[in-house]
Amino acid sequence: MNLSSQAVDYLAKRFCTILIVNLGLDYIRNTIQSSMDKRLTMWENYCFLRLSVVPEGFSLPKDDEESGSDVMDVDAVSNPDLDAHLDSLRTKLTLAEQESVQLKREIQALERQSAINNHQAALISELTKLSENDAFQCPCFFCKLSQLQKLAIELRMKVEKLKTEKEDESEHQKVRLWNEDLLRIIGGNGLSNADSQEIEGFLPGKMANIALEAEVEDVNSDLKVLNGNKLKLTIHHSNSSSIVYC
């Protein structure tokens, strides 16, 4: 119990620390975002007010002027101070864009870290709830879990055994049906009127060890089952006999 209480206290302190870190990261992110929004708004207003002003000396060309005079006299409207100021503004704007990209990357990294911390905090919270559960602290819980595992293994073995028995029963049923068909033909008039080619066609193709020694017209037959489910068919008549192994 002392170890369990210490673990709960440690997890609670850890959870508080992670929560404080997440709140701090959110505050920093909001501060940086608001500052960047203000700066970008100021730059946007400055560009609208300063960069969109028509320079002095600029005039639209008249329709009756020649094409050579359509180009504005750059020297007449050039202002070195204004050009230097524009270059400075372009440089500052480029630096501000680079800083904005870097800050966005840092914000994304902080968001990913915050998501990881939130996931860890959720796991710690679930672990705390489990530690407070009496069933988790009781040794019988692990005993029951072990028993369930053993029962699952035994159930799987029984299912495999039943499957094997079902397959064996199916094979025996096929052999029994084949034997019944053969006995029905032997007991009736089919075999007495059949020649050797018809007997060979009746037997399955996989039982290839067939020996026919004579062809008979009036026969008496004797069927025996040898070891390994092998059939011995003896056909008698007055002068000779024939044996078929299948």
Image (cartoon, grey):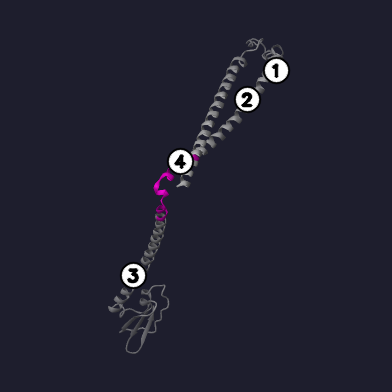
The Cα atoms of the two marked residues, 3 and 4, are separated by: 61 Å
Give me the residue at 39% from left, 61% from top. 154
SS state under label 2? helix
Q: Magenta stretch: dominant SS? A: helix
The mark nearer the N terminus, 2 or 4, is 2
The mark nearer the N terminus, 2 or 1, is 1
Front disc: 3 or 1: 1
Give me the residue at 65% from left, 12% from top. 55
Locate residue 213, reporting x and y percent. Answer: 39, 84
The correct choice, above or below, for 178 with respect to 103 in the image is below
Which quadrant is home to the C terminus? bottom left
Q: Residues within 10 Å of mark 3 (few under 14, many from 20)?
A: few
Q: Residues within 10 Å of mark 1 (few under 14, many from 20)?
A: few
SS state under label 4? helix
59 left or right, relative to 228: right
**Depth check, front residue: 92 or 205:** 92
Q: Which stretch did the figure color magenta?
A: 119-143
The Cα atoms of the two marked residues, 3 and 2, are separated by: 87 Å
Mark 1 sits on what residue?
A: 84
212 left or right, relative to 96: left
Residue 74 visible somewhere in the drawing: no
Magenta highlight on residue 182: no
Type of residue at label 1? Ala
The mark nearer the N terminus, 4 or 1, is 1
**Depth check, front residue: 235 or 4:** 4
Determine contact: label 3, label 4, CB under 8 Å.
no
The Cα atoms of the two marked residues, 3 and 1, are separated by: 103 Å
The Cα atoms of the two marked residues, 2 and 4, are separated by: 42 Å
The mark nearer the N terminus, 3 or 1, is 1
Determine contact: label 4, label 1, CB under 8 Å.
no
Type of residue at label 2? Ala
